[in-house]
Image (tube, helix red, strand yellow):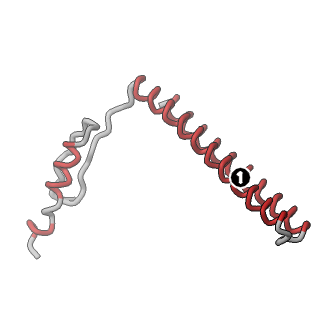
Amino acid sequence: MNANSRYQHVKPITTAIQASPHSLTPQAPSADSPTTILVPIPPATGESRRAALEQAHKIMEQANLNVKNARQAHQKRLRQMELGKKVRPDDLQKAHKQMEDVVKRGSEQVKELVDGAKRVLEHA
């Protein structure tokens, strides 16, 4: 395998990065690292930070809705098992408690992730 065929993928990758809608201009690889493409990322503008914050808020709302819907679906399954007498009452109570713990942890994780993203975006 010669050097040209070994690095023939660099040109298409560079072209794809330039063609992206993100206004990025990759730098040509250096001779000592021919497989490394440096792509300088421009600093965020106030407008792009606001847009990212709005997107983070929308994602948080959707994630919380997904957690709520999953909880609701699980509640319905547990209720069906209860009505069908397929589960002992103490097992049902244990399943409810476990579900609530999972919902609580999921909601906390969503909040932590979005708050972390907001802190980064607000102080960038």
Asked which quadrant contains residue 44, the reply is: top left
**Picture coordinates of residue 62, whole percent (x, y):** 57, 41
Asked if residue 38 lies left or right of residue 57, the reply is: left
Q: Residue furthest front?
A: 84
Amino acid at dot 1: Arg
- Point out the image quarter for the N terminus: bottom left
Q: Residue furthest right?
A: 90
Q: 81 above or below 72?
A: below
**Picture coordinates of residue 20, whole percent (x, y):** 24, 42
Of residues 113 and 100, the one nearer the viewer is: 100
Q: Residue furthest top?
A: 46
Mark 1 element type? helix
Q: 105 above or below 3?
A: above
Give the tally of numbered discs: 1
> What residue is drawn where x is 71% and y is 51%?
72
Asked if residue 52 lies left or right of residue 95, the reply is: left
Asked if residue 116 lies left or right of residue 81, the reply is: left
> What residue is drawn where x is 50% and y is 31%?
53
**Picture coordinates of residue 12, whole percent (x, y):** 16, 55
**Picture coordinates of residue 38, whole percent (x, y):** 26, 48
Of residues 113 and 120, the one nearer the viewer is: 113
> What residue is drawn where x is 20% and y is 54%?
13
Q: Residue furthest bottom?
A: 1
Of residues 51 and 121, the one nearer the viewer is: 51
Asked which quadrant contains residue 9, the reply is: bottom left
Instruction: Say few, some or many: other residues with alpha carbon within 10 Å of mark 1 (under 14 / 14 to 19 / 20 or more).
Output: some
Of residues 7 and 68, the one nearer the viewer is: 68
> What residue is drawn where x is 50% and y is 30%?
54
Would you name the residue on which mark 1 appears? 71
